[in-house]
Amino acid sequence: MQAAERAATAASPRAIAAYAYAFGALAALAFALSFPLSEDFVAGWPLVFAWPALLGASVRLAASWKSAAMAAGVPFFAAFLAHEWWMHEVTVLGMPVLVAYLAVWTVVLALVVRTLGGTRQAPRAPFILALPVALVSIEFLRGDLVCTGYAWFFAAHPLVEWPAVAQVASIGGGWMLSALAAVVAGGALDACVARGARRIWSPVAAAACLGAAVAFGAARIAAHDAVTTPPERALLVVQTNLPMSNKLAWEPAAQVEDFVAFARLTIEGAAAARKAGDSFDAAIWPETMVPGFGLEPESIRALLEGRYFPGDRFEEGLRDLSSRIGAPLVVGSPAFLRLRAEGQRWAWDRQFNSAYLVDATGARGRTDKIFLTPFGETMPIISNWDWLEQRLLDLGASGMTFDLDAAASPSTLAIEAGAAPLRMGVPICFEITKPWASRTIAFDGEARRADVLVNISNDGWFSASKAGRRQHLQVAQLRAAELATPVVRAANTGISASIDATGRLEGSLGAVTEGTLVARFRPATGTPLAARVGDGFAFGMLALAVLGCALARRVKSA
């Protein structure tokens, strides 16, 4: 990069513009390669330390704001298109809109970096400061604050492949881990383009930050591995390999057939586990695997009284299954409150995407989703107008309906049997991608309410994309390290997994296969700093970005 910088400095304006576009293209390529390219190929993760530096070099060389926007927007549109291409099978029109939306945010990132860090002719703040402030601010806005957030493609996600560094998330959340990547990138960029003492102290400071993170992470992992209490617990994960079609068109005959197949798989998995000497506290089914209208007594009563399918057959089947395997089940299911027949249509008061705890006596507890997936379960802003929402669904995602409610707060599913009660928090599907949602499920303020997070998900939406499934797994690994809480994933088409409280992958089932996995873990104790400060680090970086941009504009106008 340093040689390219010298060449650009001596080049003509047209050549400098070419360098700006080249660095932008390289930044987008490094960004795309830093995320999983398949189920197994994740080796590009170190590029997370490179792409912010390349983006910074691009906007620094760009002759104008328009050039900086083009140098970032066009190649990053291509990068997001490559990663999100799988979505065209779900929504042909929605996919390019989302890709464009993500590319626009990258343009905003580039312009904020340019505002804070300056240009080749007018440098401002060191990039070791400008890059982390800009990156975390834009990730926070895009992933959480604006339109309920799209919390994917964060710099922190690939860094779970370096467990020692990932432990920084337990201090300031995944936001701090993204900041660390940008600090290293900024130090490298300053070493290439800065003048005077900044060229020396900036990379030295970046190396010191990275070294401190590695030392902290190594110590935290060692401390985790040295703990022998409380005793280990286990859950039997059932990966059903049911495609996403069960959310769109699940015919009654197929519902019964699939339910029986899931039960058989669970019984076989339980028998195999016990033959191997493994015990487990509960069996886990993925999101939305129970057909019908849920397990609410009122709903089942309405079905029985009207002799409507499925009656109580699935509820009875789950009770029988729990008895057969000698353990309760956690199952993903819809929940309809006050279900009733009104003429030729069903009506209800509220509908949730839920998880039930079921044993031989029936449903013992339920927790509902508190965050609805943008464009998968709700349309930000647009869902305020039912008629507009339905028109857009008919146009871009025929067959889908957005009629779910979000719960005000989560519930904990507790198993009382065994050496001690086991409290399970259940982030459903994309809730694991939202720091605040997972934190709310795991903690009540600063008090721990869940010993383990059980992430049930319908990852059939990823269609043929095994890379998308692996990225979802990386996000779950980050949540585990961030909240110092083990995570057990049950995804219908994979990747189901067992993740320890440092974010390390302990075991998994391959994508697009059926099978079972005994996920062993040690229940979490204590409260990490990240759970206490919440999104405080991100708010602080956003405040710095706003202040820095305001000061830069004021200096320019003066």
Image (cartoon, helix red, strand yellow):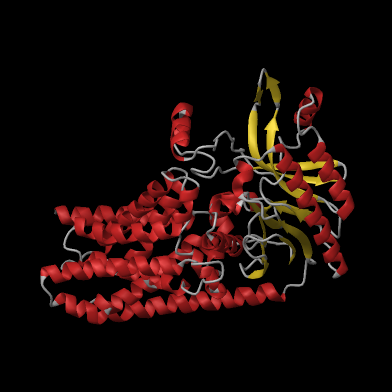
Instruction: Using the image, determine if residue 35 lies above or below residue 446.
Output: below
Q: Measuring from the top left, give residue 352's x and y in whole percent.
A: 64, 37
Q: Is residue 399 visible?
A: yes
Q: Measuring from the top left, give residue 444's x and y in whole percent.
A: 65, 49
Residue in the image at 47% along x and 38% along y: 379
84 or 379, which is in the foreground?
A: 84
13 or 291, which is in the foreground?
A: 291
Q: Measuring from the top left, give residue 551's x and y in whole percent.
A: 25, 55
**In the drawing, does residue 304 fall left or right of residue 205?**
right
Q: Give the quadrant of the N terminus.
A: bottom left
Q: Give the quadrant of the C terminus.
A: bottom left
Residue at the left extreme of this rendering: 12
Please identify the quarter of the rendering in which residue 280 is found.
bottom right
Instruction: Using the image, determine if residue 305 lies above or below residue 219.
Output: above
Please identify the quarter of the rendering in which residue 422 is found.
bottom right
Q: Measuring from the top left, give residue 143's x and y in whole percent.
A: 45, 52
284 or 369, which is in the foreground?
A: 284
Q: Is residue 150 visible?
A: no
Instruction: Using the image, determine if residue 356 lies above or below residue 18.
Output: above
**In the drawing, does residue 43 fall left or right of residue 345?**
left
